[in-house]
Image (cartoon, grey):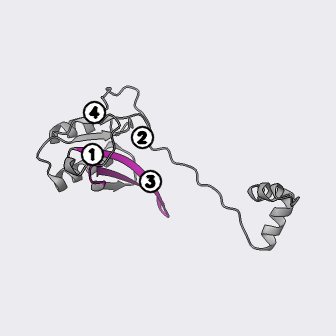
Amino acid sequence: MGPRVCVPCSREGAGCGRRRVARLMRAAGLQDRHRRRRQVTTIPDPGAALRPDLIVRDFQPDRTGLDARWCGDITYIPTDEGWLYLATVIDIASRRVVGWATADHLRTELVADALTSACRQCRPVRPVIFHSDRGCQYTSQQFASLAKEFGVPLSVGRTGQ
């Protein structure tokens, strides 16, 4: 307890030990903050078919290109009942969320529901390029079939982007 407090104090010339800081913090009713463990959500599928990066890492908004390029990702939200996973589909041109889905799991159905939501909400008249990372949900055959059904070409970037 308290090592992150000791370093700045030592730099300023105030000699203090970790135990002393811990004792003083306890006496004052203070607790140090612990960083939360990061939840890994991108698990690449080594056996997945390789897909090209059709947007060539161009994430600049372009108002004239509405419903031309979408990107998707998954984030997680800690709750009292466990993790809640949120899959979003964002229109790159407007930076607007056009589809989303939540679940208590990271299966392909989560991202499939988000893409379905986006397609039903926007009803694009021309093919929309869908860009994602190489997570197993986005590279699965089930997701590829759904995207083909909606006429959405898939584009994949490097993991974590």
Upstream in the sequence, badge 4 or badge 1? Answer: 4
Discs 3/1, front: 1
Q: Is residue 55 left or right of residue 3?
A: left
Q: Report the span colored magenta.
A: 69-95
State the separation of the CA atoms marked 3 and 1: 20 Å
**Considering only order in the chain, which callout, 1 or 3, is on the residue closer to the N terminus?**
1
Q: Nearer the viewer, mark 4 or mark 3?
A: 4
- Residue that label 4 marks: 54
Q: Amino acid at mark 3?
A: Tyr
Cα distance between the residues tagged 2 and 4: 14 Å
Q: Looking at the image, tell me whether mark 2 or mark 4 is earlier in sequence order.
A: 4
Q: What residue sits 84% from the left and 66% below the top?
A: 23
Instruction: Identify residue for label 3.
Output: 76
- What distance separates the C-alpha of mark 1 from that of mark 2? 14 Å
Circle 4: element type: loop
Res 133 quadrant in image = top left
Q: Distance from label 4 to label 3 (Cα)?
A: 27 Å
Q: Which three-letter amino acid code belongs to the residue tagged 4?
A: Leu
The CA distance from mark 4 to mark 1 is 11 Å
- What number is the disc on residue 70? 1
Q: Amino acid at mark 1?
A: Trp
Is 11 on the left or on the right of 127, as rendered? right
- Marks counted in the figure total 4
Between discs 1 and 2, the one toward the N terminus: 1
Is residue 68 rendered magenta in the image?
no
From the viewer's perspective, is 8 left or right of 69? Answer: right
Estimate how packed mark 2 is, as few (under 14), some (14 to 19) or many (20 or more) residues with alpha carbons within 10 Å.
Answer: few
